[in-house]
Image (tube, rainbow, N blue to C red):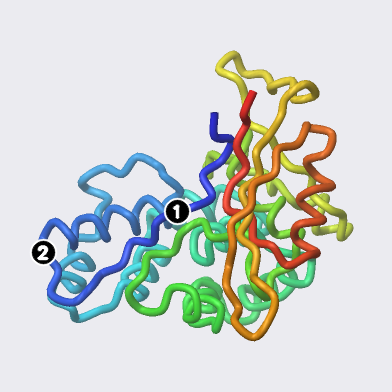
Amino acid sequence: MVLWAVETEPVELRKNPTESDLQLVIRAVYKQVLGNEHLLECDRLMSGESLLRNREISVRQFVGLVAKSDLYRERFFETNSQSRFIELNYKHLLGRAPQDREEITQHVRIYNEQGYEAEIDSYLYSDEYIQNFGDAIVPYARGVRTQPGLKNVSFNRMFSLVRGPSSSDSYQNAKLIMDWGANLPTAIAFPLTGMGGYYSNTQKRFRIEVTRAGIGPRVKRSNKTYEVGYDQLSANIQSIQKAGGKIRSIIEVH
């Protein structure tokens, strides 16, 4: 059983797309930005879709239209605390969790001084967004993989946002407020059982698939797999990250 999907295939609007290609991109934007919530036909941004279809706006600009829409405000701004709103903006627009208290404080300041639309634009027009998604790629949950330039703690924090009760973006409490508020590490959150309780993981084993860079003038990347018990999982993740490895997946083997 796969505990979490870490290898999300990016959805990109390429040149000369078919209508099927365009609809795939549009659905991916709604799913990512609106938190996988059910979308009624009347909630779709038909004027924005038309602009995208005619290539008058980019995918990034369409993402911005959805994030600035009344629907996004109603679902994630008006009903949530400011901390939860910012936490979800990171998840929806940058595909990762906030790393620390400083990131939250920065966005609180942007909102308080410049307003709602400036807060949304601060993600869309950041160097991080441009480097990872550019104008044509739909944001996706990249934070469940180790990333250059991101702290190791981001790996576990993204898991925390996509597992358990807070995986529903209608969950109104900031999931990570205690961790980033006190600059504490975040424990890995394991999925719920069908009966509503957590799995007992103490006797389980997990396969960690890792990509490592080679050593020498010709740098090649190699794949390596580790199988460890639950009690060794956290320590192995930290060791892999410190050694420069990139975790591709964590899979329960039995």
At a point 63% along the width and 67% down the height, the residue shown is 147
Q: Amino acid at mark 2?
A: Thr
At a point 60% along the width and 78% down the height, the residue shown is 219
* Rendering coords of residue 140 (x, y %): 46, 59
How far apart are the alpha carbons under marks 1 and 2?
22 Å
Report the side of 34 relative to 227 (left or right). left
Above or below 187: residue 77: below
Tell me the quarter of the image containing the C terminus: top right
* Rendering coords of residue 119 (x, y %): 55, 74
Report the side of 104 relative to 221 (left or right). right
At a point 84% along the width and 34% down the height, the residue shown is 231
* Rendering coords of residue 18 (x, y %): 10, 64
Query: Nearest the camera: 227 or 76?
Result: 227
| Residue highlighted by disc 1 | 8
| Residue highlighted by disc 2 | 18
At a point 34% along the width and 59% down the height, the residue shown is 29
Query: Nearest the camera: 181 or 239?
Result: 239
Dot 1 or dot 2, earlier in sequence: 1
* Rendering coords of residue 148 (x, y %): 65, 73
Q: Amino acid at mark 1?
A: Thr
